[in-house]
Image (cartoon, grey):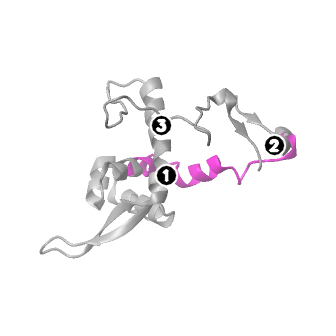
């Protein structure tokens, strides 16, 4: 269990409603299509039609989610033009989008371990060793859930 410290320890003295980082993140990225668009962007997808196909959503839903992700600063638009075609825009991850990817990989790992699937996909490092998502403190120590503390600075 995560420990709340200091002023946060008295749960009746405060409310996280409207200010919790988890709540705010879910408000922005809590749709299946937003998460899958980010997954696809991380895999290298940049073109609108490819997002529609690879995520399995309508053009209207893709346009709405892509606009939200651009407005939030997770993706940016970059113009491109195929020979003989009109100019278009592609979507590329920003640093803010890249910074979100450990969340996506944590969901990947949780789903792989706890949900029924025939998939044998695994995260791995380029050296070949399996990889995992974990929390580490600034000193480099792994932080298991029972050692995690939430506090005000």
Secondary structure character of the magenta stretch overall: helix
Q: Which of these two is toward me, 21 or 135?
A: 135
The reply to whether discs 2 and 1 touch (Cβ–Cβ < 8 Å) is no
- Residue 107: numbered disc: 3
Q: Residue 1: image x %, image y %? A: 70, 28
- Read off the residue under disc 2: 8
- What residue lies at 48% left-to-right and 30% top-to-bottom? 110
Q: Residue 42: image x %, image y %? A: 36, 50
On screen, residue 35 versus residue 143, left or right, reads: left
Task: Answer with the quarter of the image where residue 77 lies.
Answer: bottom left
Q: Which circle's residue, 3 or 1, is located before the other in the chain?
A: 1
- Asked if the magenta segment contains residue 25, the reply would be yes
Looking at the image, how many numbered discs can be counted on the residues? 3
Q: Which of these two is toward me, 105 or 36?
A: 105
Q: Which circle's residue, 2 or 3, is located before the other in the chain?
A: 2
- Asked if the magenta segment contains residue 3, the reply would be no
Asked which secondary structure carries label 2, the reply is helix
Marks 2/1: CA distance?
A: 27 Å
For the view shown, which residue lies furthest in the left direction?
84
Bounds of the magenta segment:
11-37
Q: Which of these two is toward me, 42 or 27?
A: 42
- Read off the residue under disc 1: 99
Q: Residue 85: image x %, image y %? A: 16, 74
Q: Which circle's residue, 2 or 1, is located before the other in the chain?
A: 2
Q: Is residue 7 above or below residue 132?
A: below
């Amino acid at each position: 269990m995560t420990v709340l410290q200091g002023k946060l320890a008295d749960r009746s003295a405060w409310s996280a409603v409207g200010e919790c980082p988890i709540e705010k993140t879910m408000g922005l990225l809590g749709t299946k299509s937003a998460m899958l668009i980010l997954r696809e962007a991380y895999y290298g997808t940049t073109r609108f039609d490819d997002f529609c196909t690879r995520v399995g959503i309508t053009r209207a839903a893709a346009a709405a989610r892509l606009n939200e992700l651009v407005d939030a600063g997770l993706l940016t638009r970059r113009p491109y033009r195929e020979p003989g075609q009109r100019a278009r825009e592609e979507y590329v991850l920003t640093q803010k989008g890249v910074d979100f990817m450990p969340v996506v990989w944590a969901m990947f790992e949780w789903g792989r371990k706890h949900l029924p699937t025939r998939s044998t996909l695994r995260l791995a490092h380029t050296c070949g060793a399996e990889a995992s998502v974990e929390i580490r403190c600034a000193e480099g120590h792994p932080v298991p859930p029972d050692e995690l503390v939430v506090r005000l600075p």
